[in-house]
Image (spheres, rainbow, N blue to C red):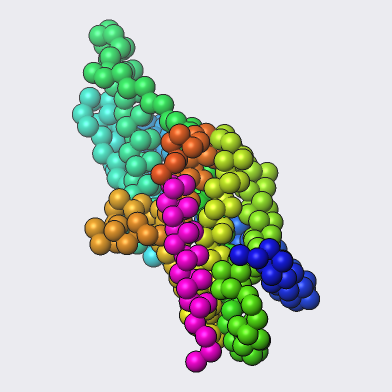
Amino acid sequence: MNGRRLRAVTRKEFLHILRDTRSLIIALLLPFIMLTLFGYALTLDVDQIPAYVCDLDQTPQSRELIDQFRGSKYFSIRGQVGSYDAIERAVDRDRILVGIVILRNYARDLLDGKRPEAQVIIDGSDSNTAAIALGYAESVIGTYGAQLRTDRQDRLGAGKIKPAVDARIRVLYNSDLKSKNFIVPGLIAVTMMIIAALLTSMTIAREWETGTMEQLLSTPLRPAEIVLGKLLAYFVVGLADMLSCVVVGVFIFGVPLRGSFWFLFVSGCVFLIGTLCWGVLVSAIARSQLVAYQLGLITSFLPAFLLSGFIYSIDNMPRVIRIISLIVPARYFVSLLKGVFLKGVGFGVLWRELLFLLVYTAFVFVLATRRMRQKVA
């Protein structure tokens, strides 16, 4: 490989990037825009669930139960109604997600030591949110019920009820259970894979369409020098995009960066080079800028979004899909990002993910270089 020829190809690509000012601005701003929009739009936090109350008992005891829901940060009581029909109409019109119904004789059964009845009606059209809302409602009612039993035992002079198990829960790495801390590192991987693949997906195809590829192939340039020269130019742009994504994640969304920045930087560079190589390979195969763009978008966005574990748990997927996800580089970079950001671990734990990214990068580079050996048909 000749350094002089490599610098010439890199300079040529830099000049092309700088001349296309609009594309350069888009390439630099798009990761920031994507990460900001997705970061605010995608959230797994479920709180302030809209709810109606139907209190058929109208007693101090029933109002005390309502106050338990009103005092919870997970529910927002939007009003009180007098019948089931009103709750069902509100659910049908998407005004509420939860209806809380306190049946008649609630206070009487409670004071008599019987089991009082209350009902929670949940809109199950969104099964995930409904399951979370059900868990919150059970937690509120369960906590309140335990408090009532304890108070009753105190009044009877039997002393406090001791739980059979003293469970002490400790949440590691994301103690506040903020979904932003889980989503944003994965978003960085998805955004970088999309941007890097699209940056280079049209480079070779553009050469074929404009006819300049024939001139390149007639020069002493080797295929590896063409591929590497184009990669170096777009690597600088991709590196700026990667750093901007990290800055947005840390300073705008407040995701803690507990691990080594330099390990994250090196791993990100490896991942970036691999995805840039993939874009060059797609461009060399397509020979058309439109086809290359579409193919680059499909092969980067869909695997990165669906098969990387970014949102959807890979362990819950069918076995065939889990096997396919093993060749998706974003899966390993997502694991690496979450490990560095949230867990503060480094090479000693994440060496397998880094090794896969290195192998993937080398493999795709070789494929792109061999594809470039093809002469004009």
Residue sitting at the far left? 114
Residue visible at 44% across and 41% down?
A: 351
User: x, y (%) of residue 356?
Assistant: 42, 51
Which of 72 and 174 lies nearest the eye of the viewer?
Answer: 174
Q: Tell me if residue 299 comes above or below residue 307 in the rendering.
A: below
User: x, y (%) of residue 55?
Assistant: 37, 44
Residue visible at 61% across and 46% down?
A: 265
* First to last magenta residue range: 353-377
Relative to 188, 336 lies left or right: left
Residue visible at 36% across and 29% down?
A: 144
Which of 370 and 260 lies nearest the eye of the viewer?
Answer: 370
Q: Is residue 372 magenta?
A: yes
Relative to 1, 335 lies left or right: left
* Image quarter of the N terminus: bottom right
Residue 151 in sight in this render: yes
Relative to 1, 16 lies left or right: right
Q: Tell me if residue 144 comes above or below residue 324 in the rendering.
A: above
The prevailing secondary structure element of the residues shown in magenta is helix
Which of 115 and 128 lies nearest the eye of the viewer?
Answer: 128
Residue 121 in sight in this render: no
Residue visible at 57% across and 44% down?
A: 264
User: x, y (%) of residue 307?
Assistant: 39, 59
Q: Does the magenta stretch include residue 228?
A: no
User: x, y (%) of residue 258?
Assistant: 57, 34
Q: Tell me if residue 55 comes above or below residue 205 in the rendering.
A: above
Q: Tell me if residue 27 comes above or below residue 64 in the rendering.
A: below
| Number of disc labels | 0
Relative to 186, 240 lies left or right: right
